[in-house]
Image: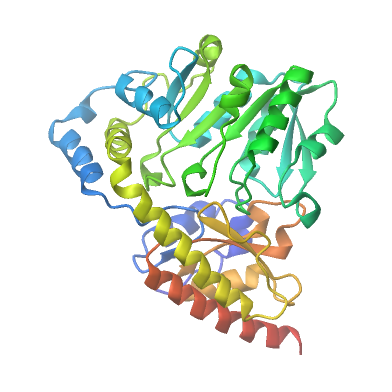
Amino acid sequence: MVFPEFLNMKTLSEGLKPSNEFFDYIFHKKEMIWMGQNTNHLNHDERIINAIIDSILNHEYCKYPPPEGFKELKRLVLEDLKLNNDEFDNLITAGGTESLYITMQTLLDSEDEIITSDPGYLIIDNFARRFGRVISVSIYNEDCNYKLTPDLVNENITKNTKLISLIDPLNPLGSCYTKSEIKAFAEIAEEYDIYLLHDITYRDFAEKHYLVAKYAPERSFTVYSFSKICGLAGLRVGSLIVPAEFMESVRSSIINDLGTNVLAQRGAIAALKHKNKWVDKVKRRTRKNQKIIKDAVDEIDGAFIPVYPSNANMLVVDIHKTGVRPSDIANYLLKHNIFIREGTYTSRLHGEKYVRVSFSIPKEQVMKFAEKFVSGMKKLSSRSSR
């Protein structure tokens, strides 16, 4: 099949109408190597699969589930984070994205401000603008170690600041917070009477991770996802963990009041119940894949990885000194059935400098990426130098 010219990466990154056709095209192309959405293709644990199949065979899909999620799953999420269920409550959602939206709707009024980072997960900014104002802070430099720091927050905080967004580890760079930084954010929240949004979607890939909820329990909104480490992205299931006294406010923001997908919840329950049986295998392969990518990037003059090793299952490859545009290498790889993401998806300020590459995929697929990335960059850079 010839790749349709109108479904190019520029169209995708700008969020124009054909983006749905683009994703429909690559989704159904079986040979496509999926390195563009930070999804996990390594966890095929039979216990998860069987739990979903059993739910189908028992025709559970004929019934609506509880609006806030199955009690067992709610309990397992809190246990996974080692949080006290007397102090915290949680809602099962259709993925971390819904959790983010509910947080914005619950906390922000029109005059309120949220501090976010660029690069970052721009959907947070888009949701926040529907309810309040966004203060986006540039963090694409070594001085701040490519992350939003307590010092940067203090420089940008105002009397209208209501919420600080901490993506931890950070999509797209994979930078992660230390314990002292998390404690500093907790102190800022207490001093200014504000809240901390802690998006921990990639938490399980990190070498070490510290929960805001442990240090600022009354000011934390924690976004939890089963999409990445569990490999359940297509089932759309996550959770929002809040201080128990906030649960009534959260309930008033729920749109999906008929509950989250039954099959997704059954798969999520099995994933958490048996997490110790599969999680280390996923993390080991993911970390080894980084080295393959690093070696390939090191072959290209001017290309570099700003945060290495990444604490997530994705990283940024900066190519702005090579003369190759992110859209060109992304399209080159796409023609070889490799899907990566241009930087403009995660940065308004720096997106033309880099591509984002995720790597929770089999080793042989990463090897193919490494080969085609090197050949593509050399070919494209020779053209740009003419």
Residue 65 visible in the displayed image? no
From the viewer's perspective, is residue 275 above or below residue 25?
A: above
Outermost residue, left side: 57
Q: State how many labels appear.
A: 0
For image coordinates 52% across by 48% down, the residue present is 206
Residue 60 visible in the displayed image? yes
At which x and y percent is residue 71? Answer: 32, 19
For image coordinates 36% across by 69% down, the residue present is 31
At which x and y percent is residue 149? Answer: 75, 41
Decide which of 149, 230 is in the foreground and name it.
149
At which x and y percent is residue 384? Answer: 73, 83
Q: Quadrant of residue 141?
A: bottom right
Is 76 left or right of 15, judged from the image as shown?
left
Is 369 left or right of 152, judged from the image as shown?
left
At which x and y percent is residue 233? Answer: 41, 45
From the viewer's perspective, is residue 190 above or below residue 270?
A: above
Q: Quadrant of residue 377?
A: bottom right
Quarter of the image with the N terminus in it = bottom left
For image coordinates 62% across by 61% down, the residue present is 308
